[in-house]
Image: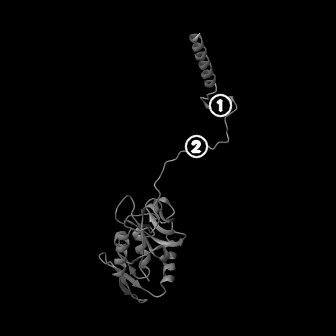
Amino acid sequence: MKKYLALLILGFLLFSCKAKQSGVITSKNEAIKKNIYDTRLPKQVTALQTKTAPLLFERTAQEQKEVDKHNESLEVIEKKNTDKIVLEDNVQDVIIKVENCSSMGEDLVKLAKQNLGSPYHTGGTSPSGFDCSGLMYATYKKFDIFLPRTSTQMAQIGRILDLKDIRPGDLIFFRTNGKHHINHVGMVVGVNDEEITFIHSSTQRGVIISSTKEAYYNRTFAQVNRIIE
């Protein structure tokens, strides 16, 4: 009797297990056939995870200390209307004092914009072709201010600014191509909500206006310097 009862229980368990298995859905097509697939469920989207670019002007304590030291050591050069200021390649820690510097900044931008569309040319300082520092050199030269010739040297002069202080005509610097030193420069056109627009000579597109909202320039941004005040 006990043996018969055990076989009866075993048979019941096997039947129950099989019944449960019959309700298992093993594919999307099967679910659709059984009318239990909900097409309203959101699609699963996969994307490459990219490292968020740091906010502009986030400086470490050590970096801020170096900026303060640089700005405190600036030598002021006063420029009269007829003066020619020549900053040799080895000159640094200087700023040029002029009358109506804000107006001059706007005029610098207007001059630079006249070269929009000019091609890129290594070593170029004319509308037939500019490199990045060549465009800045040629623009400031119109005001009898002769900057050092490379972006690395230009970054050594002028006051290093915070976002709230930036205005048109200031120079904006970048570290591109994974380099640790500054190797690209442009001129600030405008500032709005932590976005800086700037004119520069791009190796691929020549003289154009770009923005720090673009991932490449946000990622490679270095600093903004004021040469005149």
Can residue 150 be seen here?
A: no
Measuring from the top left, give residue 224's x and y in whole percent.
Answer: 43, 72
> Which of label 2 and label 1 is nearer to you?
1
Measuring from the top left, give residue 72's x and y in whole percent.
Answer: 35, 81
Estimate how packed mark 2 is, as few (under 14), some (14 to 19) or many (20 or more) residues with alpha carbons within 10 Å.
Answer: few
The residue at the point 58 percent across, 43 percent down is 44
Looking at the rendered structure, the secondary structure element under dot 1 is: helix
The residue at the point 34 percent across, 65 percent down is 181
Q: Which of marks 2 and 1 is nearer the N terminus?
A: 1
How far apart, in angstroms, are the residues tagged by discs 2 and 1? Answer: 18 Å
Judging from the image, the colouring scheme is: one colour
Q: Quadrant location of the C terminus?
A: bottom left
- As drawn, which residue projects farthest toward the right? 35
| Left or right position of 25 against 129 | right
The residue at the point 37 percent across, 74 percent down is 67
Relative to 46, residue 214 above or below: below
Measuring from the top left, give residue 68's x and y in whole percent.
Answer: 37, 77
- As drawn, which residue projects farthest toward the front? 1
Looking at the rendered structure, the secondary structure element under dot 2 is: loop
Amino acid carrying mark 1 in the image:
Ala
Q: Which of 181 and 146 is in front in this view?
A: 181
Amino acid carrying mark 2 in the image:
Gln
Can residue 14 be seen here?
A: yes
| Left or right position of 101 against 88 | right
Relative to 69, residue 174 above or below: above
Q: Quadrant location of the N terminus?
A: top right
Quadrant of the rendered image containing residue 7: top right
Residue 31 shows which numbered tag? 1
Residue at image mark 2 = 44
Estimate how packed mark 1 is, as few (under 14), some (14 to 19) or many (20 or more) residues with alpha carbons within 10 Å.
Answer: some
| Left or right position of 61 against 104 | left
